[in-house]
C-alpha cells in the first residue's frame, strides 16, 4: 500500500451539510419532524432520544429522504432481532424496507440488517448509513467496531441513533464523532481532557479498534474544568438529545411515562464465600464474581417466586448462562434466548414474546437489551452488575413511552454486592446530570439559531 493509499483509507469525506427534506409524513409528531429535519439538513449527525420517542420513525424518514434525494440505496444497521421491528414500523408510515441477511438484491432501496451481517454488504452501493442503537457498538469486539467505522467512512450521509449516549462514557462520544467524520476519540481526549496519571498522553496511542478504556483506566480521564462547556457545545454541534419533547420546547402531551417501581430484594447465601465466616461486601471483581456464583440458587429462586405469583408477561434478565438455565426451568412458561442460539431462533422467540405466545422471556441484557419494544410487559427481574447502560436499556425495554401500566423492576442482589449497587447508583446520577446539562446547552443553541436572522453583524469604524 502506497502512502497516498494509506491516507485515502483514513480519510472521511462526504457532504459537509445535508439538504432540505423532500418528504415528511404527517404521522410524525412535531418534535419528531423537527429532529428529522435537522438530521436531514445536517447530513451527518446523531439522535440521542429516549426509548419510545420514535427513533425508528425518524431514521426511516431520514433514510427515505436520502434515497429520494440521491437516487441511491440506504443501509440501516440494527442489533440482532430488531430488524423485523424496523420493517413493521416502515409499513406504518409507507416506507418500503427490506430485511436482508446475505447482501442486497436488485430493486432494494432501503435495506435493514444486523451489525453482524455487515460483511455481506459493499459500502460503495450505499449513499447513506444508519446505525440504530449505536451505543451497542462498544459491546462488539474491536474488529466489528472498526468494520462499521470503515463502512461509514466515505458514505456522504450518516446517522447514529441511540437512547443512551452514555454521557458518563466519554469514549463512546468520541467514537460516535469519529464515525460521523468529526473529531476522533484520541483527538477529543487531547483537546478536552486531562489524565490524572501525568505520564499518559493521548498522542502516544493509535486507533486500534478498541475503546480507550480497554487501554487505560477510563476513570483516569477528567474533563478540564475550563473545557466543560466547550466540550458539550461540541457534542451539540453534531447531536440532538432529548428525554421528552419539552427538552426541545414542544408539548409533552402523550409522552408521559407511567410510574416505575423498583423493589430491592437481598438474598443470603446458604454458606459464606470461601474463607469467610459470614457475608461481607465483596471487594474487587474476583470476589464479586465468586459471590454471584455462590448465590445463583438463592437469587434464581427469588426471581422465579416473584414471576410465578402471576400469569402476566415478564422478562427475567440474567448475566450468566447457568442463571438463564435455572430461571427457564423454575419459571412457569419461560423461554430462554441465549448467545448460542441462531439468529433465526432468537427472532422467533422475541417475536413470540411480543405477540403474547410466550409468557416469560429469559435472556441477557447484552442479547435482548437493545432496541426491542416490549411495552406489553410491565414486570422485570434483574440481577444488577456494574453496567449502568445494561440496566438502563433493559429496564427501558418495558418502561418506555407507549407503556400503559406501572412497571415493576425487582432488583435481586446479595449482601456481598453492596459495592456494586453503590457504583451503579453513582453512574446513574452522573449520567442524569450530564444529560441534563447536554439538553440545557442544546436548547440554548436552538434559541441562538432562531435569533441569528435578527442579529446584526458588528460594524467596525472606518479607521480600523
Image (cartoon, rainbow, N blue to C red):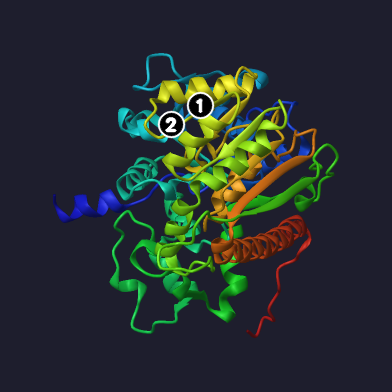
Q: Position of residue 367 (x, y in %)?
A: 47, 37
**Image position of 317 with respect to 108: above or below:** below
**Image position of 42 with respect to 27: above or below:** below
The residue at 42%/44% (across/down) is 14
Label 1: element kind: helix
Mark 2, residue position: 114
Pointer 1 or 2: first along the chain: 1
Which sits in the foreground, 92 or 352? 352
Q: Is residue 390 left or right of residue 111?
A: right
- Give the CA distance from mark 1 to mark 2: 7 Å
Q: How many marks?
A: 2
**Image position of 164 with respect to 199: above or below:** above
Q: Is residue 20 left or right of residue 444?
A: left
Picture quarter containing residue 313?
top right
Crowd class of label 2 (few under 14; some 14 to 19; many from 20; radius 10 Å): many
Label 2: element kind: strand
Mark 1, residue position: 83
Is any atom of residue 161 visible in this view?
Answer: no
Which sits in the foreground, 417 or 149? 417
Q: Position of residue 209 (x, y in %)?
A: 32, 53
Q: Position of residue 187 (x, y in %)?
A: 40, 67
Which sits in the foreground, 185 or 73? 185
Is any atom of residue 104 visible in this view?
Answer: yes
Q: Position of residue 49 (x, y in %)?
A: 65, 46
Q: Check whether the beta carbons of the residues at disc 1 and disc 2 lie within 8 A of each other.
A: yes
Amino acid at each position: 500500500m502506497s502512502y497516498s493509499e494509506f491516507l485515502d483509507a483514513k480519510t472521511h469525506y462526504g457532504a459537509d451539510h445535508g439538504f432540505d427534506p423532500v418528504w415528511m409524513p404527517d404521522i410524525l409528531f412535531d418534535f419528531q419532524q423537527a429532529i428529522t429535519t435537522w438530521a436531514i439538513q445536517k447530513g451527518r449527525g446523531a439522535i440521542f432520544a429516549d426509548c419510545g420517542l420514535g427513533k425508528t420513525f425518524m431514521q426511516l424518514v431520514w433514510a427515505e429522504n436520502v434515497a429520494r434525494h440521491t437516487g441511491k440505496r440506504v443501509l440501516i444497521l440494527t442489533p440482532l432481532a430488531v430488524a423485523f421491528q424496523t420493517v413493521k414500523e416502515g409499513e406504518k408510515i409507507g416506507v418500503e424496507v427490506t430485511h436482508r441477511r446475505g447482501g442486497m438484491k436488485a430493486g432494494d432501496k432501503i435495506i435493514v440488517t444486523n451489525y453482524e451481517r455487515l460483511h455481506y454488504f459493499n459500502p460503495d452501493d450505499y449513499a447513506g448509513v444508519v446505525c440504530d442503537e449505536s451505543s451497542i457498538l462498544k459491546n462488539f469486539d474491536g474488529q466489528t467496531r472498526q468494520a462499521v467505522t470503515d463502512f461509514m467512512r466515505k458514505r456522504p450521509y450518516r446517522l447514529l441513533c441511540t437512547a443512551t449516549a452514555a454521557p458518563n462514557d466519554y469514549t463512546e462520544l468520541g467514537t460516535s464523532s469519529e464515525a460521523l467524520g468529526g473529531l476522533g476519540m484520541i483527538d477529543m481526549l487531547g483537546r478536552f481532557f486531562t489524565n490524572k496519571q501525568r505520564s499518559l498522553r493521548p498522542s502516544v496511542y493509535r486507533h486500534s479498534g478498541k475503546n480507550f478504556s480497554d487501554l487505560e483506566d477510563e476513570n483516569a480521564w477528567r474533563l478540564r474544568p475550563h473545557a466543560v462547556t466547550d466540550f458539550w457545545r461540541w457534542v451539540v454541534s453534531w447531536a440532538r438529545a432529548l428525554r421528552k419533547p419539552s427538552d426541545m420546547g414542544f408539548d409533552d402531551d402523550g409522552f408521559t411515562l407511567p410510574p416505575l417501581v423498583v423493589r430491592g430484594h437481598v438474598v443470603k447465601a446458604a454458606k459464606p464465600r470461601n474463607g469467610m465466616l459470614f457475608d461481607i461486601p465483596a471487594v474487587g471483581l474476583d470476589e464479586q464474581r465468586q459471590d454471584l456464583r455462590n448465590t445463583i440458587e438463592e437469587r434464581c429462586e427469588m426471581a422465579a417466586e416473584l414471576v410465578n405469583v402471576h400469569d402476566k408477561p415478564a422478562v427475567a434478565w440474567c448475566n450468566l448462562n447457568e442463571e438463564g438455565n435455572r430461571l427457564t426451568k423454575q419459571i412457569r412458561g419461560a423461554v430462554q434466548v441465549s448467545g448460542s442460539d441462531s439468529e433465526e431462533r432468537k427472532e422467533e422467540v422475541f417475536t413470540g414474546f411480543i405477540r403474547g405466545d410466550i409468557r416469560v422471556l429469559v435472556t441477557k441484557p447484552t442479547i435482548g437489551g437493545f432496541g426491542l419494544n416490549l411495552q406489553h410487559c410491565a414486570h422485570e427481574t434483574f440481577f444488577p452488575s456494574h453496567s449502568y447502560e445494561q440496566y438502563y436499556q433493559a429496564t427501558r425495554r418495558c418502561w418506555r413511552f407507549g407503556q400503559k401500566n406501572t412497571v415493576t423492576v425487582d432488583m435481586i442482589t446479595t449482601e456481598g454486592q453492596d459495592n456494586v449497587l453503590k457504583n451503579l447508583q453513582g453512574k446513574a446520577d452522573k449520567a442524569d446530570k450530564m444529560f441534563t446539562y447536554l439538553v440545557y446547552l442544546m436548547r440554548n443553541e436552538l434559541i441562538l439559531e432562531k435569533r441569528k436572522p435578527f442579529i446584526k453583524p458588528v460594524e467596525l469604524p472606518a479607521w480600523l
